[in-house]
Image: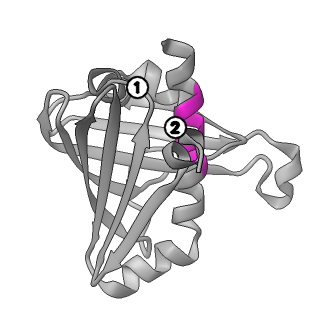
Amino acid sequence: MSDNKVKRSMKTNVEGRTLTMERIFDAPRDLVFKVFSDGERLASWWGPKGWETENRSFEFKPEGEWHYCMKCIDKNQGEWYGQESWGKAIYQEIVESEKIVYKDIFSDAEGNKVEGMPEMLISLTFLDEGDKTKLITKSEFTSVDALKQVMDMGVVEGFTSQNEKLDDYLNQLQ
């Protein structure tokens, strides 16, 4: 198996109400952390392929909020074209170059929680792997049913696509 295929593969595990996804990026840990901690950089790659992200607000600090909108700009995505998906992250814990923990909610354009949509506690752990970085994303849901709802929405496929965009963005920066 080529290094490229190893690098681009993602391991996923579902246990109870927790989804864990691991992926190795061909970039140093400080750089990978930086593209999550800088609002402009984050908006440059966040979301699946064919979607653009615009920040409404971005405060990278504990209790700070990131409010954003993803919009499908790819006409080939059929009914998704032109659709918007609003979200909000409320940062809980930040350890420079090591860890980011945030509450993730589906929101409206004003930042209000969308009722009936799951809320998640996301933990990002950045680990050195030589000159590469292993990113472990752990998403904890309030219930197994909430996890199933997001799985049925295609979270793994969307996250895989988003990680491919992140790979491309990291390559541009190096």
Compare marks 2 and 1 and give the one earlier in the sequence. 1
Task: Name the residue tied to disc 1.
Answer: 27
Residue 66 at x, y percent in the picture: 34, 36
Most common SS among magenta residues: helix
Residue 157 at x, y percent in the picture: 59, 61
What's the mark number on residue 158? none
Q: Residue at x 44, y 54 (%)?
A: 107
Q: Residue at x 48, y 52 (%)?
A: 108
Picture layout, residue 86 above or below residue 132: below
Q: Residue at x 77, y 39 (%)?
A: 73
Specify whether residue 91 is painted magenta: no
Is residue 47 visible to us here?
A: no
- Amino acid under disc 2: Trp
Q: Between marks 2 and 1, how big is the CA–CA gap?
A: 17 Å
Secondary structure type for disc 1 = loop
Picture layout, residue 21 above or below residue 19: above
- Amino acid under disc 1: Ala
What's the mark number on residue 46? 2
Q: Give the label, 2 or 1, closer to the camera.
A: 1
Q: Residue at x 72, y 41 (%)?
A: 50
Picture layout, residue 171 above or below residue 122: above
Q: Tell me which colouring the rendered structure shows.
A: one colour
Is residue 145 visible to us here?
A: yes
Identify the magenta region: 161-168
